[in-house]
Amino acid sequence: MSTTKVSSSKGAIAYTELRRRILSGDLAPGSRLSQYDLAEEMGMSITPLREAVRQLASEDWVEVDTHRDVRVAPMSASEARQLLEVRLSLEPSATELAALRRTDREVAVMRAAAEKLLPVTRTWGEDAVTAHRAFHRAIYLASHNTVMIRLLDDLWDKSDRYRRIGLELPAGDEPRTIDLNQHHRLLELVIAGDGPAAADLARAHILNSLTASVTGALEARESGPLQLSYRSYAG
């Protein structure tokens, strides 16, 4: 095996691990990354770690300043709003396509994902976030539009950081129960092949989603520090 291949393989490992830590909040927004410490911790040289950082920077997961300091990309009301707007543009269309193109096997996957849904609140925490994403992905995969799927995967990755902030908001049991029930109605419409109705419900669902609540909260707080963390809900 050539050195180039070894480096690329380790770079991929470093990329996957760093991205996982950013998504989970283990590497907090705005925190500085010590590349040498991370390379030593992962048991690799600095070269593949830097490869991973370059890729993460190209995808806006980290920022590299003029002094080559690397920081996890911060979170902001502006980004949250942009992510929400893009989701409103893409996901209803993907849902409508799914209603027209879904296969029996894909319907079975959607049903299985729906059975695992939980209210996305502090009580259910990470399990609810994971189940919520799996359900929506099962639907938009059935669109059979590879470009749209790739864009939505990236969108959901970035939005998940904001959903985890949402777990720190007041519980809001009624809105989250409505949100949960909408999932099941959405599934019924997709299975029935009613694309326009499924798209309309997807749009309403997004407008009332946890991500929308987080966006509003961030916009209200943007003049002061955000006093929320990823971890306190687990205590």
Image: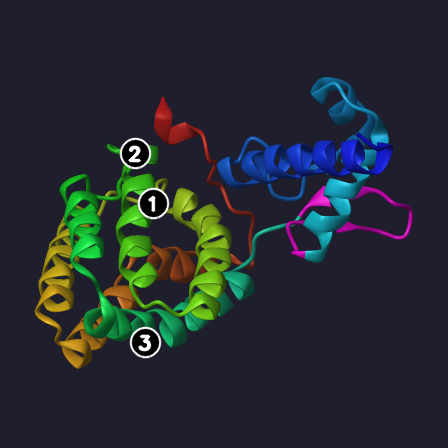
The tag on residue 127 is 2
Q: Position of residue 228 (x, y in %)?
A: 46, 40
Q: Are marks 2 and 3 in contact (CB under 8 Å)?
A: no
Looking at the rendered image, the disc whose residue lies closer to the viewer, 2 or 3, is: 3
- Near mark 3 (Cα within 10 A), the count class, few <14, some 14-19 or many ≥20, is many
Q: Nearest the camera: 53 or 10?
A: 10
Q: Position of residue 141 (x, y in %)?
A: 34, 60
Identify the disc placed on residue 93.
3
Above or below 141: residue 119: above
Marks 3 and 1, Cα distance to the nearest angstrom? 29 Å
Is 146 part of what is drawn in magenta? no
Q: Is residue 70 left or right of residue 156?
A: right
Question: How many discs appear?
Answer: 3
Label annotation for residue 169: 1
Q: What amino acid type should be assigned to the residue bearing mark 2?
A: Asp
User: Image point 73% across, 41% down: which residue?
Assistant: 52
Q: Which residue range is magenta in the image?
A: 59-72
Q: Amino acid at mark 3?
A: Ser
Where does the image place residue 178, in percent across and percent down from the top left?
13, 56
Q: CA distance from mark 2 to mark 1?
A: 17 Å
Q: Distance of mark 2 from mark 3, alpha carbons?
A: 27 Å
Q: Secondary structure at mark 2?
A: helix
**Which tag, 2 or 3, sits closer to the chain's start?**
3
CA neighbours of label 1 inside 10 A, class few (<14), some (14 to 19), many (20+): some
Decide whether residue 63 is among the magenta residues.
yes
